[in-house]
Image (tube, rainbow, N blue to C red):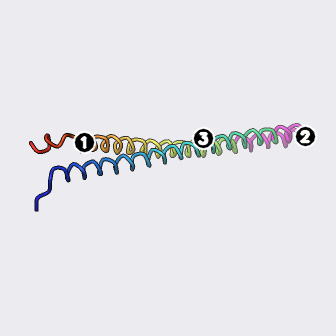
Amino acid sequence: MHVSAGAIQSWITVAGLVLDLLGFVLLLREWWLAFFHETSELEADRRKAWERSLRHHQATTASDQLRAHLDASSRIHDEMMERSAQARHEKTLRSRKGMFVAATVLIVAGSLLQIVGALPADLWASL
């Protein structure tokens, strides 16, 4: 069975388009992660501001002994929240970086396949 150069070109172009589409979908996923990560960060900042305000109010009405306890527990809570936020941030960045690199590779490979598939038919005949 003989496959014509035109059929090969068509399938190479189709493969390139599929890789481009997959790369673009991965890029959209990376943007989606970025959007939700930023939204999460803003919500965490709002929550921290509210907690600080609440703590300030509690500290102004508490006795000296209770105020020392509230300050210590607030520092511990803040440190735990900060470590948790940092871990989430690093995990999100790693995931985004991996998706971005994979998307870039797929888009470049897809574009190259489309270029090869679009080469003039007489060039293919000489191969």
- Callout 2: 10 Å neighbours few (<14), some, many (20+)? few
Q: What amino acid type is highlighted by mark number 3?
A: Glu
Q: What amino acid type is highlighted by mark number 1?
A: Ala
Kindly report which numbered mark, 1 or 2, lies closer to the viewer in this rendering: 1
Determine the residue located farthest toward the bottom in the rendered image: 1
Start and end of the magenta stretch? 55-75
Q: Position of residue 4 (x, y in %)?
A: 14, 53
Asked if labels 3 and 1 touch by Cβ distance under 8 angstroms, the answer is no
Name the quadrant containing residue 67.
top right
- Callout 3: 10 Å neighbours few (<14), some, many (20+)? few
Spatial CA distance of label 3 from label 2 is 35 Å
Kindly report which numbered mark, 3 or 2, lies closer to the viewer in this rendering: 3
Q: What amino acid type is highlighted by mark number 2?
A: Thr
Q: Which residue is mark 1?
A: 118
SS assignment for the magenta stretch, majority? helix
- In this image, 49 relative to 3: left or right? right
**Is 56 within the magenta?**
yes
Asked if labels 2 and 3 touch by Cβ distance under 8 angstroms, the answer is no
- Please indicate, yes or no, whether residue 14 appears anywhere in the rendered image: yes
Q: Which residue is mark 2?
A: 61
